Amino acid sequence: AAALLNNPGYGVPAPEVRAVTPPPIGGSFYSHSRYKENRRPEPHGMLDAVKALAIERWNYRDGMQAMENVLPSSDDDHIGPMAEDWQKKIGLGDGETISVIDFMGVTLKAMQELASEVEDLRKEIHYGKK
């Protein structure tokens, strides 16, 4: 990965790149614009996609921790969507995993849309219905 990022043909000046492998769970991710390409606005509609997700409480099956060696205990409860539903409703992922980066971005976009709806309702209440 470091060789790829340090390749000037990749579009990132070599002196600005520090190759770091984030920990499997948690940690920080490079998000500066100089590391990204093909940027485009996300269309409106993420809030509806998030609302359509089934959010359930669950735990990993016995034996999954040994398989991945990074997963929490099968006794730990979690809450969230299933990866296959995420892929179908959000349009991201492989149907097996959910990227933490994508999860954060989708959450932030849905929050922006919700904030916009709240602002529209405030204006409607303040100025009366049109």
Image: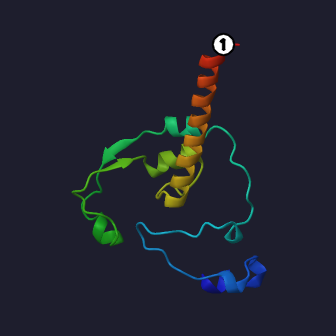
Q: Quadrant of the N terminus?
A: bottom right
Say above or below: 116 vs 12. Answer: above
- Which residue is most to the left? 75
At which x and y percent is residue 18?
Answer: 59, 82
Query: What's the residue at 65%, 67% (across, down)?
Result: 32
At which x and y percent is residue 44?
Answer: 67, 39
- Residue bearing mark 1: 129
Q: Amino acid at mark 1?
A: Lys
Query: Element under label 1?
Result: loop
How many numbered markers are drawn?
Answer: 1
Say above or below: 100 vs 12. Answer: above
Query: What's the residue at 59%, 24% (across, down)?
Result: 122
The one nearer the camera, 89 or 15, is 15
- Which residue is most to the top? 129
At which x and y percent is residue 107?
Answer: 52, 47
Neighbor class of circle 1 (other Cα within 10 Å; few <14, some 14-19, many 20+) is: few
